[in-house]
């Protein structure tokens, strides 16, 4: 890990800002390229004017679809906004909540799974000890740097990664971030 960190000086993990915007952008970017996600996000912001939960709920589904969102993603974005407006998700509580409590709250939103919730913990809340075991980049980097290229497969492979990552605790988010940088030096924004 030390050599990976040394190979990437002057870069660091930074918060991505507003909780709602971070999650909305994650939903927009699901299962499409980064370039396509950026284009859809720009159209989304232009069409909505304000990217607030109430602002999104005031927009018609047809307006959101015209931005390039599928029917399913429109449903997800509107459910996300409804969770924020109703207070089911309240960012002011995040500081006092544990990681698993926040994950549980977020996966209640349609379109937000554990991986998205973990990315939120890492990139928005800067939680230091998140180990996203379903992240393909993390698994590939562990394979390359720690397993001589042997793929990480199934529960057994993830258990092996968990055991390896024990030495990184309580900084597993940071270790994950540097492992991502070892594969791609340009950080992805969520």
Image (spheres, rainbow, N blue to C red):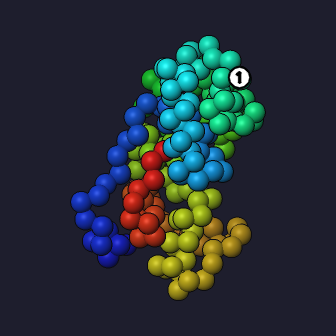
- Closer to us: 2 or 116: 116
Quarter occupied by the N terminus: bottom left
Query: Is any atom of residue 165 visible in this view?
Result: yes
Q: Residue 92 occupies which quadrant of the picture?
A: top left
Say above or below: 28 vs 50: below
Write the residue at 57% across / 68% down.
139
Residue 22: where, in percent of width, then height?
Answer: 49, 36
Tell which of 164 and 69 is nearer to you.
Answer: 69
- Residue 37 appears in which quarter of the rendering? top right
Q: Residue at x 54, y 65 (%)?
A: 137
Instruction: Tell whether 181 sits left or right of 130.
Output: left
**Which secondary structure, mark 1?**
helix
Report the residue marked by disc 1: 61
Residue found farthest to the bottom: 148
Identify which residue is drawn at 30% across, 67% down: 8
Compared across the picture, whether 76 is left or right of 2 comes to right
Position in image of residue 34 (x %, y %): 53, 51
Establish if 8 lies above or below 122: below
Q: How many marks?
A: 1
> Considering depth in this image, is 75 or 148 the residue closer to the camera?
75
Q: Is residue 9 above or below residue 153?
A: above
Residue appearing at x 63%, y 50% in the figure: 32
Furthest toward the right, the residue is: 71
Residue 67 position, x and y percent, is 62, 32
Residue 71 appears left or right of 177: right
Residue 162 seen from this side: no
- Hey, which residue is sitting farthest left in the picture? 10
Q: Nearer the viewer, residue 156 or 37?
A: 37
Count residues near mark 1 (Cα–Cα under 10 Å), then give few for <14, some for 14-19, many for 20+.
some
User: Residue 98: x and y, percent?
Assistant: 50, 38
């Amino acid at each position: 890990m030390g050599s990976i960190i040394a190979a990437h000086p002057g870069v660091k993990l930074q918060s991505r800002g507003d909780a709602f915007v971070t999650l909305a952008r994650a939903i927009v970017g699901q299962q499409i390229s980064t370039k396509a996600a950026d284009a859809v996000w720009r159209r989304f912001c232009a069409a909505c004017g304000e990217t607030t939960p109430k602002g999104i709920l005031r927009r018609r589904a047809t307006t959101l679809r015209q931005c390039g969102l599928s029917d399913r993603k429109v449903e997800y974005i509107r459910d996300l906004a409804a969770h924020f407006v109703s207070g089911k998700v309240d960012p002011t509580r995040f500081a006092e909540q544990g990681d698993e409590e926040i994950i549980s709250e977020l996966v209640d939103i349609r379109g937000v799974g554990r991986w998205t919730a973990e990315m939120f913990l890492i990139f928005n809340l800067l939680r230091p000890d998140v180990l996203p075991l379903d992240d393909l980049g993390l698994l590939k980097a562990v394979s390359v740097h720690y397993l001589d290229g042997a793929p990480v497969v199934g529960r057994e492979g993830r258990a092996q990664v968990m055991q390896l990552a024990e030495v990184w605790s309580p900084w597993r988010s940071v270790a994950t971030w540097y492992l991502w940088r070892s594969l791609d030096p340009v950080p992805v924004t969520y």
